[in-house]
Image (cartoon, rainbow, N blue to C red):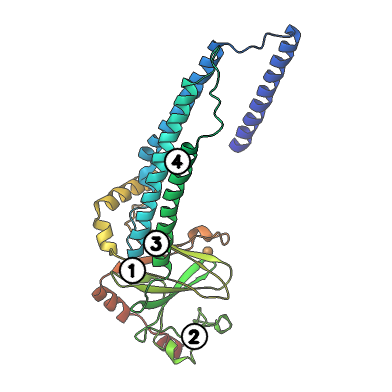
């Protein structure tokens, strides 16, 4: 009902504005032809209005960083993420410095050189020095940025994975399942036609490599240990997104995709981080207002591709811990072979 009333108010306001404009037009016609020459005073009012709106907008952009800056993702906690952050920071600093200088000049100049009685514009057909300057400076800066971007991309997407621990993340509407490669660090073959009973990932039990695989509903990663995540999807395209590590990879039915990265902070260290404590305080205050209980920080893997009705809730908890803690947890899990034979 409220939505309908809001809609009605908007429609009536628009009709009202259109009618007022029409009355003004008709009134102008009745008055007959007017003297349409713009005076210096008109120009001053318009230039001043443009200066106020333009500089006001520029100032608001600066203020919005203070207002909403704390809502952006925290610094990445992965080795490649630090490279991405450096690229992001460099790009943003360049963009913002250029933005604030050019916007301020634009509106100040528009005011300063407003139309005045008797003033004429400078007629300049060509200036080699200027042309050279405003072509070469952006070209130089952009080439630098592109080379920096390409090198960051290569380091991120084609890393050395010789010592990486292999695991699989399997997507389906609307949950995630993880599979560890076990002691041999090799995942057994899998195919969707083999899905059935407890074998929700379609792992091929005839492949001996699959015997020590471990299928779990929680992702555990070891700090400073590179992990090679292989992704599959059962139904539609999903996208595995690990925001804190700057990781995202599509999970596509019928093919396997992968991403290798190294986490650099455990969940415990993250919970003790002063900046994270501050962020969680903000989140928990918002939750308290809605009558929801407080939560602790946890890493998470989310689906970042709108994949259906419960997409919003498609997530799996990620825990980063020490090698010893990981070993204790892994020892408690059943291997695929144990699970299948117990069936
Ligand atoms: Cu999804």
Name the residue beneath numbered marker 3: 152
Q: Nearer the viewer, residue 176 or 82?
A: 82
Res. 324 image quadrant: bottom left
Estimate how packed mark 1 is, as few (under 14), some (14 to 19) or many (20 or more) residues with alpha carbons within 10 Å.
many
Residue 221 screen position, x and y as percent: 33, 71
Which badge, 4 or 2, is on the more N-terminal residue? Answer: 4
Q: CA distance from mark 2 to mark 1?
A: 25 Å
> Which residue does the image show at 33% across and 59% down from the upper left?
82
Q: CA distance from mark 4 to mark 2?
A: 59 Å
**Which mark is in front, 1 or 4?**
4
Under tag 4, what secondary structure? helix
Name the residue beneath numbered marker 4: 133
Quarter of the image with the N terminus is top right
Estimate how packed mark 2 is, as few (under 14), some (14 to 19) or many (20 or more) residues with alpha carbons within 10 Å.
some
Name the residue beneath numbered marker 2: 189
Which badge, 1 or 3, is on the more N-terminal residue? Answer: 3
Instruction: Say if 133 sits above or below 321 in the image.
Output: above
């Amino acid at each position: 009902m409220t939505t309908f009333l809001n809609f009605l108010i908007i429609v009536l306001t628009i009709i009202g504005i259109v009618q007022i404009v029409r009355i003004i037009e008709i009134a102008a016609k009745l008055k007959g032809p007017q003297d349409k020459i713009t005076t210096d005073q008109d120009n001053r009012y318009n230039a001043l209005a443009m200066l106020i709106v333009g500089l006001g907008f520029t100032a608001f952009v600066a203020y919005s960083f203070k207002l909403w800056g704390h809502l952006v993702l925290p610094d990445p906690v992965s080795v490649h993420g630090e490279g991405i952050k450096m690229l992001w920071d460099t790009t943003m600093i360049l963009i913002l410095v250029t933005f604030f200088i050019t916007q301020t000049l634009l509106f100040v100049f528009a005011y300063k050189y407003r139309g005045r009685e008797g003033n004429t514009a400078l007629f300049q057909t060509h200036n080699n020095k200027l042309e050279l300057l405003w072509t070469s400076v952006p070209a130089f800066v952009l080439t630098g940025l592109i080379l920096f971007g390409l090198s960051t991309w290569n380091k991120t997407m084609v890393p050395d994975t010789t010592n990486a621990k292999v695991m699989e993340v399997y997507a389906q509407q609307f949950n995630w399942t993880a599979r560890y490669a076990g002691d041999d660090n090799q995942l057994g073959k899998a195919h969707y036609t083999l899905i059935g009973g407890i074998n929700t990932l379609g792992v091929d039990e005839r492949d001996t490599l699959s015997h020590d695989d471990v299928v779990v509903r929680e992702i555990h990663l070891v700090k400073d240990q590179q992990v090679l995540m292989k992704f599959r999807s059962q139904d539609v395209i999903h996208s595995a997104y690990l925001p804190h590590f700057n990781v995202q990879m599509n999970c596509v039915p019928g093919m396997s995709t992968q991403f290798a990265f190294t986490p650099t902070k455990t969940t415990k260290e993250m919970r003790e981080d002063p900046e994270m404590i501050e962020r969680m305080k903000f989140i928990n205050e918002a939750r308290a207002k809605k009558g929801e209980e407080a939560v602790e920080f946890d890493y998470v893997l989310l689906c970042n591709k709108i994949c259906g009705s419960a997409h919003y809730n498609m997530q799996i908890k990620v825990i980063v811990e020490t090698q010893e803690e990981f070993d204790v947890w892994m020892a408690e899990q059943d291997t695929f072979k144990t699970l299948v034979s117990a069936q």
